[in-house]
Structure formats: C-alpha cells, structure tokens
Image (tube, grey):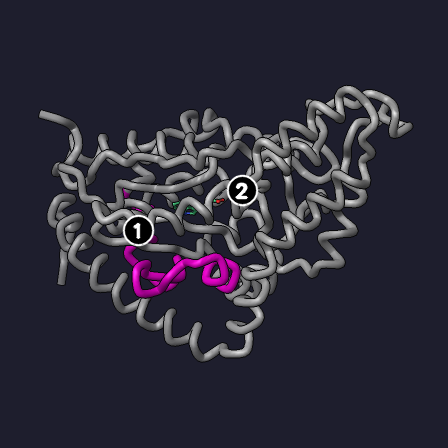
C-alpha cells in the first residue's frame, strides 16, 4: 500500500504579500499558474495570499503585509488569474490552517527544520543564528498545512520552494501512517525558466536589492532599469567583441523575446564585435514593454474597482471554508479529537 491517499487533482499555490510582484515572479510562478488554468485534468484550483507566512519575518511591520495583500492579488489578476477558475483566499481567514499546523508540528523535529536548505539560507542571510524566531523556523510546517488543508497535490512554485514540498510530503506520509491515509502525494510543478537574475547581474531579482522590474512599472521605469542593466564590463567600444554569457540583456532576451533566431544572430554579432549595448537595450525595452503593457493596463483598470476584489475575496473565503470544513472533520476523527 502506498503511504499516500490517491491523487486529488487539486491545485494550490500562493504568494507572500511582502511587495508588488516583478518579472522574476512572473516567469518563476505566475505564468505557470495562469497556464495551468487551462489544464482540464485539474478539478479545483486555489490561490492563497500567505499573509501569516509573510508575518513570520515581518511581524514588526504588519502594515506592510496588510497593504500588500491587495497588491499581490491585483498583480495576479492582471496577469490572467481568473477567479472563475481559481478560488482566491487569504491564509489567515481560514482557521483550519492554524489547527493543521499545530497537529503537523508534532510530526517534525527541530533538526529537520534546520536542515531545510531554503530556510537555512534565509537564516544565514538574515543573521538569525540560534536566535531564529520559532515562527520563522517552522513556516514550512505551516506551508504544508496551506497545501494539505484542501488536500492539494499540484503546487506550481519557483525552484526555491521545492524543499518545502519535500517537507510537506514527509509530514503527509507521517500523518497517513500514524493516523489515517488522508493526504495525497504533493507534486511541485516548477516553471520551465530558472530563477531570473537581477538587472545588476545578481543571481536573484528582488525588492530588497532594488534590481527587479515590476509588473506595474511604467515604460519610463522599464527604460531606466534596462538602460542601466549589467552587460559585459569589458565591452567598452562598439567594435570590441562582447560576452554573451552572464550578460543580463541577453539573459532577458532569451526569456522574453519570442524571435529566437534574431536573438541568435544578435549574439553572434555581439561576440564578433560591432554591436553596441544601446541597440540591444532598446530592443529589450520594446520586448519587456510588450509583456508588461497589457498587465499594467489591466491592473490600472482593476485598481479602480476595489469592490470587485472584495467580492472575489468573499466568494473565495466561502468556497475555501466549505472545502476545509470537510477535511477538518476527517482530520479530527483521525487524530481522535473532539468535534463538537
Ligand atoms: N513560500 C511561498 C513563497 O515564498 C508562498 C507560499 C505560502 C506558498 N504558502 C504556500 C506557495 C503554499 C505554494 C503553496 O513564494
């Protein structure tokens, strides 16, 4: 017997509401989740705004989380997330997630939590050391609850989230073995694109590094960011041969420019010498403007109608509550809890 329940074909994904979303989010996760709306083998889809998880490293700045709940919803809707196909809800409004987190806490050791590569990297980056807040160390447990509270088994995420999916499966398997086989095996669906580099060439595009192009950026902002993009520091004169590898303009063209043969030609020309950065950057500005302009326009339209978001959130809450109440009853029975 497998240690997992049969496939559920339920999709769940989410964002931390810590800031507006940028092109890194777009290629890393949003595009993927929007495309999966057309996959007819999926029976239910959920999109969660993970506000409680956002608080785990922003608990001293609740306004930031509060304000960005709407921003990330607007970004996702503007990119094509469709509330008719995807139930949109806010993590903190669903009490069963907290209950399930509590139950899952018993199934994970502190040493296992410290071994999670993504958490480990974050702890180092934030200089927490042993003074890491328990809420932060344990967020992968609550992420397992996010996913399993609706028995989701398809989770489109960026590659950095895979350790959390692995932990979710360990937790699900332990629960299934110990109590009752309720939870399916969770599959992380990674976008075909790797993590998007920042405009400065840093491995990661992020808000804190100020090297990201936002889905709500104006044409002027896009232009400014592309014009200051990292290229090849040794490519001083147009006539000089230039390097393509590690050149951010080409990295972005590879991802966003549909005319692959033209990009290949430009690369050859650049390596030979005689092609200036400005020509390339102008091309990239047009390419990115073509991607972002429709998103920006839709976002502006949605921003004018806050009641529409309220309505989506109310419906999403009701649908998610109904779904989690069924599963909560099964969980309480399995763990022999009172269910009054
Ligand atoms: N940790 C995810 C991120 O930082 C956000 C998230 C929270 C999530 N809960 C989730 C993603 C459940 C997928 C499934 O991007």
Answer left or right for 184 relative to 239.
left
Q: Which of 252 and 89 is in front in this view?
A: 252
Name the element at disc 2: loop
Query: Is residue 177 positioned above or below 40 on the image?
Result: above
Residue 133 image label: 2
- Could you say which disc has been placed on residue 261 in the image? none
The image shows residue 296 at horizontal and vertical percentages of: 59, 63
Residue name at image x 51 percent, y 64 percent: 74
Q: Considering the image in quadrants, where does the N terminus appear?
A: top left
Of all residues, the one furthest to the right in this rendering is 237
Cα distance in 3D space between marks 1 and 2: 40 Å
- Please rate how many residues cluster around mark 1, counting C-alpha atoms within 10 Å: few if below 14, some from 14 to 19, many from 20: few
Asked if one can make out residue 149 in the rendered structure from this viewpoint, the answer is yes
Q: Which residue is drawn at 59% across and 55% down?
A: 292
Q: Are marks 1 and 2 in contact (CB under 8 Å)?
A: no
Q: In this view, does 230 lie above or below 79?
A: above
Residue at (59%, 34%) from the top-left corner?
254
Horizontal arrangement in the rendering, residue 277 relative to residue 267 (left or right) = right
- For disc 2, the neighbor class at 10 Å (few under 14, some 14 to 19, many from 20) is few
Q: Mark 1 points at which residue?
A: 38
Q: Does residue 104 sit above or below 99 in this rendering? A: above
Give how far across and how far down residue 202 sits, in percent: 70, 33
Secondary structure under tag 1 reads helix
Q: Nearer the viewer, residue 100 or 216?
A: 216
Q: Quadrant of residue 166?
A: top left
Mark 1, mark 2: which one is toward the viewer?
1
Q: Is residue 98 magenta?
A: yes
Task: Please tell me which residue is depicted at 63% across the width and 47% down the height of the picture.
Answer: 287
Viewer-side residue, 226 vs 101: 226
Q: Quadrant of ligand 1?
A: top left
User: The magenta stretch spans which residues?
Assistant: 74-103
What is the x, y in percent for residue 338? 14, 55
């Amino acid at each position: 017997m497998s240690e997992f329940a049969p496939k559920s074909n339920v999709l769940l994904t989410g964002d931390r509401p810590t800031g507006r979303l940028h092109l890194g989010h777009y290629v890393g996760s949003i595009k993927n989740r929007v495309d999966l709306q057309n996959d007819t083998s999926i029976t239910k889809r959920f999109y969660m705004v993970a506000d409680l998880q956002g608080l785990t490293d922003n608990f001293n700045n609740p306004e930031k989380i509060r304000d960005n709940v709407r921003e990330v919803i607007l970004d996702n809707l503007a990119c094509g997330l469709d509330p008719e196909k995807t139930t949109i809800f806010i993590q903190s409004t669903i009490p069963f997630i907290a209950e399930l987190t509590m139950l899952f806490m018993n199934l994970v050791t502190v040493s296992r939590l410290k071994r999670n590569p993504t958490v480990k990297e974050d702890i180092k980056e934030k200089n927490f050391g042993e003074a890491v807040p328990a809420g932060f160390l344990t967020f992968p447990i609550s992420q397992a609850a996010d996913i399993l509270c609706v028995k989701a088994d398809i989770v489109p995420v960026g590659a950095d989230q895979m350790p959390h999916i692995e932990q979710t499966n360990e937790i699900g398997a332990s629960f299934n073995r110990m109590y009752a086989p309720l939870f399916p095996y969770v599959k992380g669906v990674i976008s075909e694109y790797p993590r998007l580099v920042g405009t400065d060439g840093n491995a990661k595009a992020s808000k804190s590094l100020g090297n990201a192009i936002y889905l709500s950026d104006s044409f002027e902002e896009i232009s400014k960011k592309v014009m200051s993009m990292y290229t090849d520091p040794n490519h001083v004169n147009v006539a000089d041969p230039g390097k393509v590898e590690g050149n951010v303009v080409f990295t972005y063209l590879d991802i966003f420019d549909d005319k692959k043969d033209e990009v290949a030609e430009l690369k050859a020309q650049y390596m030979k010498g005689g092609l200036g950065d400005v020509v390339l950057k102008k091309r990239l500005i047009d390419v990115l403007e073509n991607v972002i302009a429709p998103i920006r326009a839709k976002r502006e339209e949605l921003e004018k109608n806050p009641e529409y978001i309220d309505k989506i959130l109310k419906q999403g809450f009701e649908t998610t509550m109904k779904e989690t109440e069924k599963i909560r009853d099964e969980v309480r029975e399995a763990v022999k809890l009172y269910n009054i």
